[in-house]
Amino acid sequence: MEVTLLDAYRTLGLERQPEHGLAYMSLRRAIRHTIESGAALAGQALPSERELARLLQLSRVTVRKAITGLVSDGLLVQRQGAGTFVADRIVKSFSRLSSFSEDLRARGLKPRSQFLDRGTGTVTPEEAMALNLSPGAAVVRLHRLRFAGDEPLAIERSVIPRAFLPDPALIEHSLYEAFDHLGCRPSRALQRLRAVAFDAAQSRLLGVPTGSPGLLIERRGFLEDGRVVEFTCSHYRGDIYDFVAELHND
């Protein structure tokens, strides 16, 4: 880890910059790069704050601030009396609007999808309310099992108005990549989280015992003009996923 992090720091040209008030951001970026490139693996320990400060010729305050930020981002975890480690659970922040694929790639993991069903139809009453559509409006439905490599992590059902996604075959891997290509990526979203227990069918797909704890996330994604572009319900494995939110006292 010491060598790869130092290499990342040098590759980014950061060791040639004098330390300044935002030096922690540069270090944070270097550590993130090391993790996202796969050079640092899940569960791997970081050098101590003292050792990082010595290696990179930075103050311990700068090192501590960079690590604290990455802990908040879910990329690092700190264990009392043991040190700082690359997170071995997937921690998703509610403060950033990102896709499943983007979240996994940001942690050096390989996202993959298996389509359980995809097609077109007309909205149900629940979907019409969620998407602000009139009865009978045409939609695309995607039902996918989401993986990190060969490990199933989530079951995802998405409903998208056909006005935004005319053909479900346009989705190869990532829905948000298709949105980017079509020019209709959500600019904001409302999400609701609740705890669930997986039924037999869900447990079989995810490879966990029936009744295992999970997290259900309902997301409505909005364009800048207020139109709803997606309604997605995702069941995440509770033994792998943590969700965090940063709160401010305004």
Image (cartoon, rainbow, N blue to C red):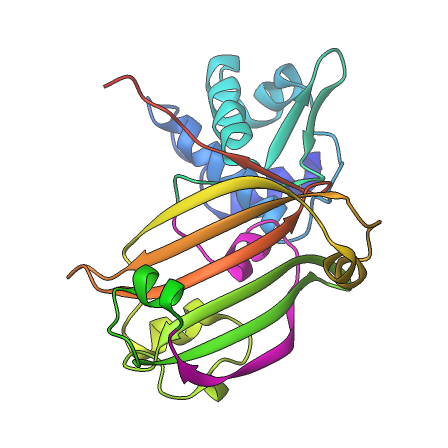
Name, please, the residue furthest toward the top.
81
The magenta-colored residue range is 97-123
* Residue drawn at 84 percent across, 49 percent down: 209
* Residue drawn at 75 percent across, 11 percent down: 81
Instruction: Measuring from the top left, give residue 75's x and y in whole percent.
Output: 58, 38
**Is residue 30 or residue 239 the one in the foreground?**
239
Residue 126: name its quadrant: bottom left
Quick check: can you spot residue 226? yes
Name, please, the residue furthest toward the left.
225
The correct choice, above or below, for 224 with respect to 250 in the image is below
Q: Is residue 244 magenta?
A: no
The correct choice, above or below, for 70 with respect to 63 in the image is below
Q: Is residue 98 magenta?
A: yes
Instruction: Measuring from the top left, give residue 33's x and y in whole percent.
Output: 55, 47
**Is residue 169 or residue 142 the one in the foreground?**
142
Residue 85: name its quadrant: top right
